[in-house]
Amino acid sequence: MRQNAYRVRRTSLYLRIIDGKIWIEEDGTEDSIVEELMAEEISQNEIVLAFHSPVLRPLTDFAIA
């Protein structure tokens, strides 16, 4: 029996669909989910990089909200 053993959990991918746009809240995947979405011909105007603060989102080429 091990003492102080515990499991570490982490969300590796968290997406939401809000008002028809894909909000990427967290992307801890090895290959970026953004590139996967764009390969499926989803435009940058339909993707919100929600892991960036609202102040920084206008600096990206993606939707701001």
Image: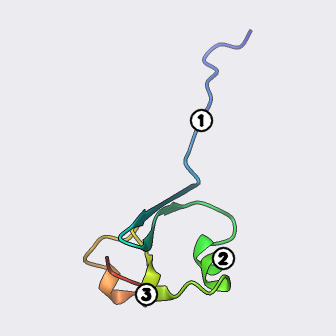
Check disc 3 and give the amino acid type.
Asn
Question: Viewer-nearest of labels 1 and 2?
Answer: 2
The residue beneath circle 2 is 36
Do residues under tags 1 and 2 come within 8 Å of each other at their CB atoms? no
The residue beneath circle 1 is 8
Please report whichever mark, 1 or 2, sits nearer to the chain's N-terminal start: 1
* Disc 3 residue crowd, few under 14, some 14–19, many 20+, Cα 10 Å: few
* Disc 2 residue crowd, few under 14, some 14–19, many 20+, Cα 10 Å: few
User: Going 40% across and 87% down the picture, which residue do you hit?
Assistant: 60
Check disc 2 and give the amino acid type.
Glu
Image coordinates of residue 36 in percent, x first then y, are 66, 76
Q: For residue 33, which numbered disc appears in the image?
A: none
* The quarter of the displayed image where residue 27 is located: bottom right
For this view, does 38 lie left or right of residue 18?
right
Q: For residue 45, which numbered disc appears in the image?
A: 3
Q: CA distance from mark 2 to mark 3?
A: 15 Å
Above or below for 32 versus 26: below
Image coordinates of residue 46 in percent, x first then y, are 45, 81
Check disc 1 and give the amino acid type.
Val
Seen from the viewer's position, the closer of residues 23 and 1 is: 23
Question: Viewer-nearest of labels 1 and 3?
Answer: 3
As drawn, which residue projects farthest toward the front?
20
Q: CA distance from mark 1 to mark 3?
A: 35 Å
For this view, does 25 lie left or right of residue 65?
right
Please report whichever mark, 1 or 3, sits nearer to the chain's N-terminal start: 1
Q: Secondary structure at mark 1?
A: loop
For this view, does 9 lie left or right of residue 61?
right
Q: Secondary structure at mark 3?
A: helix
* The quarter of the displayed image where residue 54 is located: bottom left
* Disc 1 residue crowd, few under 14, some 14–19, many 20+, Cα 10 Å: few
Do residues under tags 2 and 3 come within 8 Å of each other at their CB atoms? no
As drawn, which residue projects farthest toward the top?
1
